[in-house]
Each structure stands twice: as C-alpha cells, then as structure tokens.
Amino acid sequence: MSVLSAHEVQVVFNQGEPEEVEAIRRISFELEKGETLAIVGPSGCGKSTLFNAIAGLIEPSAGSVFVEGRRVDRAIGHVGYMLQKDLLLPWRSVLDNILLGLEVRGAVTTTDRERVLDMVRRYGLAGFENAKPSQLSGGMRQRVAFMRTLAIDPGVILLDEPFSALDFQTRLVLQAEVMEVIRERGKSVILVTHDIGEAITMADRIIVLTNRPAEVKSVHRIDLQASERNPIKLRSSEKFNQLFQTIWSELGIQIGAMRNNSEPVTASLE
Ligand code: ADP
Ligand code: MG
C-alpha cells in the first residue's frame, strides 16, 4: 500500500521572470508503507525543493502530491520533517525540545510526556532529559531532532541530509541507530542524501535524480537483510561496491573540475 505518491511534480521558481529557475521537472514516485526510500542527486538539483513541495511549504507549478490519500495543498503537519540543521531551541531542555511539535498541536498530556521520556531513555539520551542543546554533541543534537520528528508520530518522515554535518564515525553510528528505530516502528521514510553509501545502507529503494531540473534518472531496489545493513561491514561487500559504482557513474560526478583544464596535468615524481 502506498502512503505517499507524487504525480508529475514540477517546480519552477520565479516563473515568467528573467530569473526563472526550473528546479524540478515532472517527478513521479510512490512511497510504500514501512518503506525507506532514498533520493540521491547532485547538490542543487532540487532535492530540498521536492521535500518542501511534499511538506506543503511550496506549491508545485504542476502536478500533485498525495499523503495518506489526501492531496497536499498546505503544511498541516502531515509529515515529520528533519533537516541537516537541528533547529533546536537553545533555552529549552532536550525533553521540551522533543515535545515542541506536540505542543504546537495542542495540550501535551501526561501520557505524551511519559511516552517521550521513554523514547529519550531508550534511544541513547538517558540522563540528558533536562540538558540544554548547548551541552550536547552534534550527534546527540541530531538524535534529539530525530526524536522530535518521531514524537508527533507522523505517517511519513522526511529526512533532508540529516547526518551530513556530522563527522564520519558519528554519521555511521546515527545511520545504524535511526535505521533501527525506523524499522522497529515500521515508519515510512524518505531520506534525501548526497551520500551514496548512506543511501545503500539505509534504504529499501534508491531514486537517483539528474542535475537540475531534477528528473528521475534511475531506480534501484536494495535487497539487503537487516542483518547485512551494518554500515561498516556492508562497505566491504561486493554488493555494496557494485551499487556504489553504478550510482556514482549515474550521477556523472566529475573529479578534477577545479583544475585548469587548459594545462595538461602530468604526473611527476621529481
Ligand atoms: P538541493 O537540495 O538538491 O541541493 P535545492 O532544492 O535546495 O537543491 O535547490 C534547487 C535549485 O532551486 C537551486 O538551483 C536553488 O538555487 C533553486 N532554488 C531553491 N529555492 C529557491 C527559491 N526560493 N527561489 C529561487 N530559486 C530557488
Ligand atoms: Mg538540499
């Protein structure tokens, strides 16, 4: 069963003006219930724009998005949205930051508080319930941001490059943790990332986008068991390497673009 569908979504900024930018050109896809779908694309191709359209923060120039059977026409909290920047409120404790989304929706009940406290303790922040964000490491802050997204129990979770500001080790740890929580709770997730390894590790399916204006270039199903998805072990497997190479070449990433191409590059050991 699909929980989200995008039909021929197009987004053009400043339409009809000299500074017109076509960010997205006719993107269609479905997200199945309980699926983790990764969207990989070059920087600036329109990934965040696509998320903003799904969240109802911008209106597509053409096409439509449906979440749980309802057409998205404005932001009404139908999705949980987590960004690279954690956007935690510095004056609020960990617990109160996580409760923020629930507060915005209405009164927070004792049951809500208990449920959130239980989540905080289970997912690696026991003892930090009353800490302020400034007392936390980058990885812990992203854990808090993720829990705030989970707390409202959204039908669909959007993760926009959620780990890209973290160092490599912390990123791998969080990928594994977040993946576990998502699977345990059967959440439906779209993960936007430019990290191919992250997409292979975490996703059931990967959509590769072209350069701007973004279109779907290819779709890969990642048939890995949960036990194979260890971010470290997986990286040394043949399956991982093959997929990585395929997606890398589809993205058309050029190394050496910063060089002055008019001068031939010659290797020299002198
Ligand atoms: P990504 O997340 O893939 O890096 P974005 O979706 O942020 O890319 O941006 C896609 C393109 O749309 C970029 O060229 C960006 O400059 C442009 N863009 C994004 N938001 C706006 C806006 N509000 N007005 C005009 N252009 C925008
Ligand atoms: Mg972006």
Image: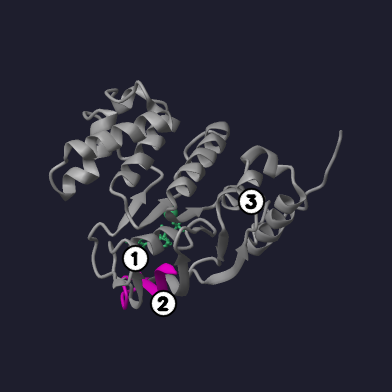
The amino acid type, in three-letter code, at marker 2 is: His
The amino acid type, in three-letter code, at marker 1 is: Ala
Circle on res. 7:
2
- The residue at which mark 3 appears reads as 225
Which numbered disc, 2 or 1, marks the residue that appears first in the sequence?
2
Q: Is residue 42 left or right of residue 31?
A: right
Mark 3 sits near ligand 1, with its Cβ under 8 Å away: no
Q: Quadrant of residue 150?
A: top left
Residue 89 visible in the picture: no
Q: Main secondary structure of the magenta part?
A: strand
- The residue at which mark 1 appears reads as 53
Q: Is residue 195 left or right of residue 28?
A: right
Q: Which residues are magenta?
A: 1-20
* Quadrant in which the N terminus appears: bottom left
* Quadrant in which the C terminus appears: top right
| Residue drawn where x is 41% and y is 44% of the image | 84
Q: Position of residue 146 (x, y in %)?
A: 38, 42
Residue 267 visible in the picture: yes
The amino acid type, in three-letter code, at marker 3 is: Gln
Which numbered disc, 1 or 3, marks the residue that appears first in the sequence?
1
| Residue drawn where x is 49% and y is 68% of the image | 214
Label pair 2/1, CB-CB below 8 angstroms: no
Q: Position of residue 226 (x, y in %)?
A: 60, 47
The residue mark sitting in front, 2 or 1, is 2
| Residue drawn where x is 38% and y is 54% of the image | 157
Q: Is residue 250 left or right of residue 142?
A: right
Q: Is residue 78 above or below residue 129?
A: below
Mark 1 sits near ligand 1, with its Cβ under 8 Å away: no
Cα separation between marks 2 and 3: 30 Å
- How many neighbours does mark 2 have within 10 angstroms: few (below 14), some (14-19), or many (20 or more)? some
Cα separation between marks 1 and 3: 32 Å
